[in-house]
């Protein structure tokens, strides 16, 4: 975890329920001193993984990235967002857009609903004053958080991200059997298939899942040593993304359109006509905007770094390779770092810093270069 205690703020409240959605802001180390003229700092805005179905801003915290960002004099920001279901990708896009607008607005609300005009740490030992540079915001994320970073690149204009960092990000290619086909044999790290009839999953499946209350913060909970499988996930949300992938219905929940997975499967069997029919399906359902592979615009997509383990079974490396090809054809700047023999979340494994410190440093240099370009605008 981080060496510093973050400033925790509410960046939005849902109008219908009043649900607060939080963001943690970590100052650089060393921190800026108190000043009447607060400095504008670059920031890395990070989105957590969890298949969009579970987790919070402290889940699977990327300590290696946090340390490099804050040591370089930048702010590190880790944010919650609404989770599937009942949220959809459309809700998450709104959360991401609201978050970036909030960060550069300079008017903040703390966890108690009080206005905070600057980023202020109330600890008596230090008070931090700084604002976030709207021209130097990089978006980053791991797994599903990588998809959030892509969605920011696609949809956020005020401010517009100056860089994208994806760590084995989802969404580089949604039109694959990984998302669309029913699995009948183990497919994720060799683990047994889940039982869709398990009563614990019932509230999260269509159509009843739409009655759930919105959530944006679900902590990771694991069974203790007394359980038949010690360390097994104790909250059904921790298994939801895997269940949706197993059923070949993940895109139904991401788009909020039950049946879209079935329609896409049928369309993809039509050979040369497939691409046109797929586009028509997504346009008709109003979901094309949730598919990064259809949203790379020449001159708009920021410089991007994609990091991926070659043996990833949760998000196949082909997703990053596919998106990289699309970006290059569009003339975007893209760098790809592939990690041979590595599975999903390899950067959290013991010894990752020792094995891949040089590659992690390359990520830091990529961000520094992008922040320099952003400040030139």
Image (tube, helix red, strand yellow):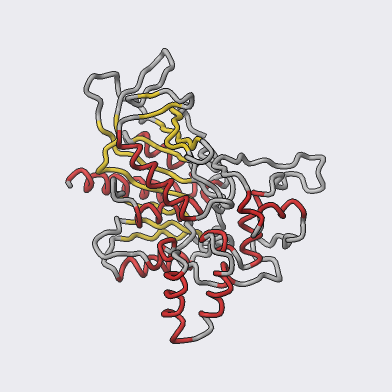
Name the residue furthest left.
Answer: 376
Name the residue located 68 percent from the left edge and 62 percent from the top edge.
Answer: 190
65, 145: nearer the viewer: 145
Answer above or below: position of 106 versus 267: above
Answer above or below: position of 84 versus 185: above
- Residue 246, image quadrant: bottom right
Answer above or below: position of 368 versus 309: above
Name the residue furthest top.
Answer: 124
Q: What is the x, y in percent for residue 374?
A: 23, 46
- Left or right for 43, reference 88: left
- Left or right for 283, reference 230: left
Q: What is the x, y in percent for residue 137?
A: 31, 44
Q: What is the x, y in percent for residue 318?
A: 48, 68
Q: What is the x, y in percent for residue 75?
A: 35, 35
Number of numbered discs: 0
288, 350: nearer the viewer: 288
Name the residue located 42 percent from the left edge and 18 percent from the top edge.
Answer: 122
Name the residue furthest front.
Answer: 16
- Residue 338, image quadrant: bottom left
191, 219: nearer the viewer: 219
């Amino acid at each position: 975890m981080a060496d510093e205690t973050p400033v925790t703020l509410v960046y939005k409240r849902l109008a219908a329920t009043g649900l607060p959605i939080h963001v943690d802001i970590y100052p650089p180390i060393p921190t800026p001193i108190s000043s009447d003229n607060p400095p504008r700092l670059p920031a890395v805005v990070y989105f957590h993984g969890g298949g969009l179905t579970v987790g919070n801003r402290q889940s699977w915290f990327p300590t290696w990235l946090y340390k490099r960002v804050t040591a370089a004099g930048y702010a590190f920001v880790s944010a919650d967002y609404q989770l599937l279901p009942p949220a959809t990708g459309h809700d998450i896009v709104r959360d991401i857009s609201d978050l970036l607008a909030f960060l550069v607005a300079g008017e903040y609300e703390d966890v108690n609903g009080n206005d905070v005009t600057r980023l202020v740490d109330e600890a008596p030992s230090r008070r931090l004053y700084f604002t976030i540079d709207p021209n130097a915001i990089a978006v980053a994320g791991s797994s599903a958080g990588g998809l959030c970073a892509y969605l920011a690149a696609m949809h956020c204009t005020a401010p517009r991200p100056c860089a994208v960092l994806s760590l084995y990000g989802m969404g580089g290619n949604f039109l694959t059997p990984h998302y669309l086909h029913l699995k009948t044999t183990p497919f994720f790290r060799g683990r047994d298939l889940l039982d869709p009839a398990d009563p614990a999953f019932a509230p999260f499946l269509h159509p009843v899942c739409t009655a759930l209350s919105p959530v944006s913060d679900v902590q990771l909970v694991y069974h203790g040593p007394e359980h038949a499988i010690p360390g097994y996930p104790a909250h059904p949300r921790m298994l939801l993304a895997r269940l949706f992938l197993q059923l070949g219905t993940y895109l139904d929940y991401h788009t909020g359109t039950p049946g879209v997975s079935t329609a896409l499967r049928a369309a993809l069997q039509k050979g040369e006509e497939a691409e046109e029919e797929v586009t028509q399906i997504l346009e008709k359902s109003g979901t094309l905007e949730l598919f990064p592979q259809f949203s790379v615009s020449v001159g708009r997509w920021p410089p991007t770094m994609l990091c991926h383990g070659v043996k990833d079974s949760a998000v196949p490396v082909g997703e990053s390779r596919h998106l990289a090809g699309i970006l290059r054809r569009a003339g975007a700047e893209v760098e790809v770092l592939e990690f041979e023999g590595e599975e999903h979340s390899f950067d959290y494994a013991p010894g990752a810093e020792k094995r891949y410190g040089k590659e992690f440093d390359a990520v830091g240099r990529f961000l520094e270069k992008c922040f320099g370009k952003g400040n030139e605008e």
